[in-house]
Amino acid sequence: MRRAIIILPTYNEASNIEKLINTLFSECEQIKRWDIDVLVVDSTSPDGTADVVRNLQKVNNKLYLLVTGKHGLGKAYIDGFDYAIRKLQADVVFEMDADLSHNPKDIQSFLQAIEKGADMVVGTRYSKGGSIPSNWGIHRKILSIGANIGVKVGFMNLSQSEWTNGYRAIRKWVVQKVIPDMQDYTGYVFQVAFLDKALKTGAKVSEVPVHFIDRVEGISKIIASQYIFQMIWYVLVHSSFIKFVLVGLVGAAVDFGLAYFLKLNGVVVLLANAISAEAAVLCNYLLNNFWSFSHKKVVGGLITKILSFLKFNLVAIGSIAIQLLGIKIGIMIGTEKYWLWYKLFTIVFVVIPYSYILYNKVIWKKR
């Protein structure tokens, strides 16, 4: 029988933990095809959370406790994953909040998604069937929804509806693959970083709609300003899309700079621009392959790399055609006076998304 371990990171959750654990085991008893245990990872809570768990252990041999220092949510999960896989022989681990905001009844749906082939399942509040509390203040709704949209757009991964929720089920191999790169993410940004790295390993990620329930007892541990800064910084540093845009700016500098240099040295305008354009394409290809898309860069012999470069050129030609079409439409609707604005609008809102999506589908495909 396959084994799942539900990991509950806690800090000052004495008022919630007993009710949650009892509800969890009540729900898990109805799932006959999985052997499910619960692991509480307590960060030395001064309110006696660990003592509550120890008392419950006296009558429940499927409940485990790991007491650690107070090092943040990410570190608690890293320690919990290690204990669950190495000592408890978990095939699947769950991430779950200990404040009763995640409904134990959803565990069944998570495991069904795993059984259907998912490597990781994320509880989503932002797709059909999911929700956030209606009584949240407008500022909290803006923070939650805005953070999620910001990550989606920053990674240009619009198919993933939920990035920040901490209700998840993950196969052992994904954890073992991702965790070595997670040591620096001890706070709440851990959730974004883990999902990003899991996707980049090629893990198949599914979503299950969940209704998020606001905590009744205790206080939230999240510090909004710190969380927002860490999340923005992570996306800026690790987003292939943002790197792709920066590479595009470098390519533009190469294009304009080389064309100007060649023109100054007597090369005719058309030839100078043809040479500079191809130099920019080559520059963009190399930087994208070894930086933007380094996690899935083109590998193989010379023929493979030449073919991928030719495909890159074709996409680049398509980008030029789209630019020209956008300018033409703009002139037809408005006036030639603003052609530069039409060009800029077309590049930002059409060419960049078109190129990024096509490069991911045709050249830097998932391996």
Image: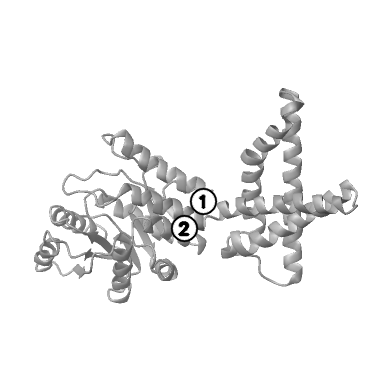
Q: Mark number for residue 155?
A: 1
Q: Is residue 264 visible?
A: yes
Q: Amino acid at mark 1?
A: Phe
Mark 2 is surrounded, within 10 Å at the Cα level, by few (under 14), some (14 to 19) or many (20 or more) other residues, namely some
User: In this view, which residue lies farthest toward the top?
Assistant: 334
Q: Earlier in the sequence, mark 1 or mark 2?
A: 1
Residue 51: x and y, percent? Answer: 10, 65
User: On the rendered structure, is 205 left or right of 45?
Assistant: right
Q: Quadrant of the C terminus?
A: bottom right
Residue 187 placement: quadrant: bottom left
At label 1, counting other C-alpha atoms closer than 10 Å, the crowd grade (few under 14, some 14-19, many 20 or more) is some
Kindly check if marks 1 and 2 are in contact, taking CB atoms under 8 A apart as contact: yes
Question: Measuring 85% from the left and 51% from the top, which residue is drawn there?
Answer: 264
The residue indicated by pointer 2 is 196
Instruction: Indicate whether 45 appears above or below 180.
Output: above
Q: Nearer the viewer, residue 27 or 230?
A: 230
Quadrant of the image occupied by residue 23: bottom left
Q: Nearer the viewer, residue 119 or 46?
A: 46
Q: What percent of the width, then of the height, locates residue 6?
A: 27, 62
**Left or right: 291, with 273 as reference point:** left
Under mark 2, the amino acid is Asp
Q: Determine the residue positioned at 13% across, 53% down.
A: 15
